[in-house]
Image (cartoon, rainbow, N blue to C red):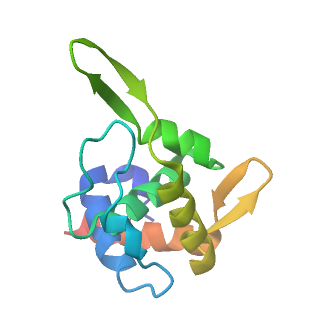
Amino acid sequence: MVSAREVESGKLVEQLKEKLKSVEQIKPPAWSYIVKSGIHRERPPQQPDFWYVRTASVLRRIYFDGPVGVSKLRTYFGGRRRRGYKPARSRRAAGSILRKILQQLEAAGFVSKDKKGRKITSKGQKFIDSVAAEVKKN
């Protein structure tokens, strides 16, 4: 049995993104093309399938680190904020995007709420492991 820990993360996220496009509960909201993904960004995401890439990455993070909440994910997806001539500082990512992604993953049955945050369900673990097996085979 192949797990997600045994395959390259970039290839796993890319494959998960393609599989998540076929899940009907996961759809980008209308505002997702306009908003920035955090205060540390200068522009909104330029990728046309940004929502699915971020969803795949969040699902992978919950698989590895779960249970996690929005605050922990905001820290993980954050980055450096450039402040002109002053030194850059670390800033957290936008919480609304991550919150909506978690709600969609919960509606799809891949994650469930726990007292300490969201954790992966058996359906979500099977989904990720099957994609990881495909990545390992190719």
Residue 94 picture location, percent across and down: 46, 47
Residue extending furthest top?
86
The residue lying furthest to the right in this view is: 115
Residue 48 pos. (x, y %): 21, 69
Which residue sits at x=41%, y=50%?
A: 5
Q: Position of residue 90 (x, y in %)?
A: 40, 24
Residue 46 lies in what quarter of the image?
bottom left
**Looking at the image, which residue is at 41% across and 57% down?**
4
Q: Is residue 8 visible?
A: no
88 or 105, nearer to the observer: 88
Relative height, residue 105 to residue 35 (above, below): below
* Above or below: residue 85 compared with residue 2: above
Residue 104 is left or right of residue 51, and the answer is right
| Frontmost residue, 96 versus 108 | 96
| Above or below: residue 56 compared with residue 110 | above
Location of the C terminus (image quadrant)? bottom left
Quarter of image, res 20? bottom left
**Residue 85 % position (x, y):** 21, 12
Displayed quadrant of residue 56? bottom left
Q: Quadrant of the N terminus?
A: bottom left
Asked if 97 appears above or below 68 in the picture, the reply is: below
Q: Nearer the viewer, residue 89 or 104?
A: 89
Number of on-image labels: 0
Residue at 42%, 79% in the rendered image: 27
The one of 11 and 47 positioned closer to us in this rendering? 47
Specify whether residue 55 is in view: yes
